[in-house]
Image: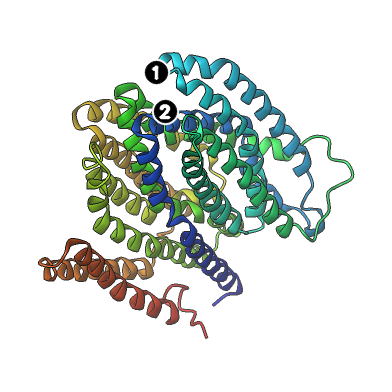
Amino acid sequence: MTPAIARDASDLRRGLLVNLAGYAVKSAYPVLTWVSIYLYGREAFGAFIAAEAILLLSMRACLVGLDKAVLWWVPRQEETGERRGLRSVLVCVAGTSAVAAIAIATQLAPWLAAWRDAPGAELGLRWMAVGLIPMVLTEILVGAALGKRRMEALVVVKEGLVPVCLMVGAVAFYFVGWHTNGLAWAFVLSRVAGLAGAAVFFRRAFRDSQWPASDRRPPAALVRYALPVWFAEMANSILLRLDVMMLTALTDPATVGVYGAILQVGNAIRSVRRAFDPLMTAIISHIGVAHDPQRLVASFSHATALVVAIQLPIFAFLWVFTPWVMERLGEGYAAAGPAVLLLSAFWVVNGALGLHGMIIRGYGRSDLTLANVIATILVEGPLLWLLVPEHGLVGAALAVGLAYSLQSVVQVVQAWYITRTWVYSRTVLGVLALGVLSAAIMGLSWLALAGCDLPVARASAFAAFLLAFGPGFWWMHRSGQLAGGMVHP
């Protein structure tokens, strides 16, 4: 086993542990989301989701691709000079976000409220615009920490601290009587907390370097890298919220609110693979310099196996409990159960295939990255237009899932064309086979307990899945199958 493969395996195992630790916090998020929807109502939550989509798109515009650029920039610097250019980048995005926040608060908020015939939404969006500034600063700090392979900044802060603070704050504000703008204030609070958390991880990651004496403008090389990435990120931001925007136009706020719950639950699976993206980009970029096929196959298969191994138990949990929970949330939510499961199943497929996009980025083909995002928009938009009016929430989940699945298949072909290497080993097939076997045991357990109280039967079936999948995956890990044959002491 080469030292490079051993290092990659060590970083990937560490990434797995960070993800698992993050889920100890994120596991509360779906429950808090359901509580917030119940307290504020579907219409208020739908307006909040629509406003959040606008701010996420604005954030991408304000960043000008610099958050992704620092991920590439930091590893190229000497250890003592890794902060070079970062101060000017922070000043730059702070300025763009301040301008955008003022524009949203003064111009866009009244227009959006009038368009949706919801005067109460105007003040909420004005408050949420304040959160745009800490949002963009957090992205830069997290991107820089990821350049040091510190996945904690992403998993713990962006995908743990921020969403949990959002929903905890929303519930707290509701119970102290701030019903009208509780969601908006919780949004701002969560983004400030995220910035504080990102600053802590940034300081730890860069403790061996100092701020440069002169740092007036971002380095030219950093800007040249950022601008093409910016177009791809802007297109991707449109894609990420295209479903919400289409539902906002085609349906009512209550339906958008229910779909917001579907997205939040589905993101529990989707975020697993996305948490590995920065680490895999760094690893594959290093591999791409000399194109080491052995290392590429070992590292890529190891990462894919870890992603799938985290996603499958989450999907099993959702499969068992989602219909039961949705039926108890009230009118309009029972129909969301099939949509949650359908979208989650597509995200599992995307987890197994989607890391090919990091091969494309790592080998420098950002042009293909941009082309793939645009193509996915062109596929998803018409699918939403055709399927949502007829099939509602299930149609939206189907449109999104099909569009991303097509993107993943295209990326598989492109990755093979670029590397001329089939990057899957038997490791991935072994994890998938273990997942199928565990699902079969879960299904048989459920049938055997059909006469019991329903929650007991569901919990027992999920426990059966864990008892089958957990030891099997642990054996694969300890025997060295995940890391290309390297046995761990």
Q: Which residue is mark 1?
A: 116
Which corner quadrant of the image does residue 372 belong to? top left
Residue found 54% across the figure and 40% down from its top: 366
Residue 375 in the image, given as x and y percentages of width and height = 39, 33
Q: Amino acid at mark 2?
A: Ala
Categorize mark 1 by other alpha carbons within 10 Å: few (<14), some (14-19), many (20+).
Answer: some
Q: Residue 72, can we see it?
A: no
Categorize mark 2 by other alpha carbons within 10 Å: few (<14), some (14-19), many (20+).
Answer: many
Query: Which residue occupies the foreground of this view, 22 or 171?
Result: 171
Residue 81 in the image, given as x and y percentages of width and height = 81, 53
Image mark count: 2
The answer to whether 81 is drawn above or below residue 439 in the figure is above
Residue found 63% across the figure and 42% down from its top: 192
Q: Is residue 267 left or right of residue 341?
A: right
Q: Is residue 433 left or right of residue 368?
A: left
Q: Residue 339, can we see it?
A: yes
Q: Amino acid at mark 1?
A: Arg
Give the farthest residue toward the left.
Answer: 451
Callout 2 touching callout 1 (CB < 8 Å): yes
Residue found 39% across the figure and 50% down from its top: 30
Q: Which residue is mark 2?
A: 47
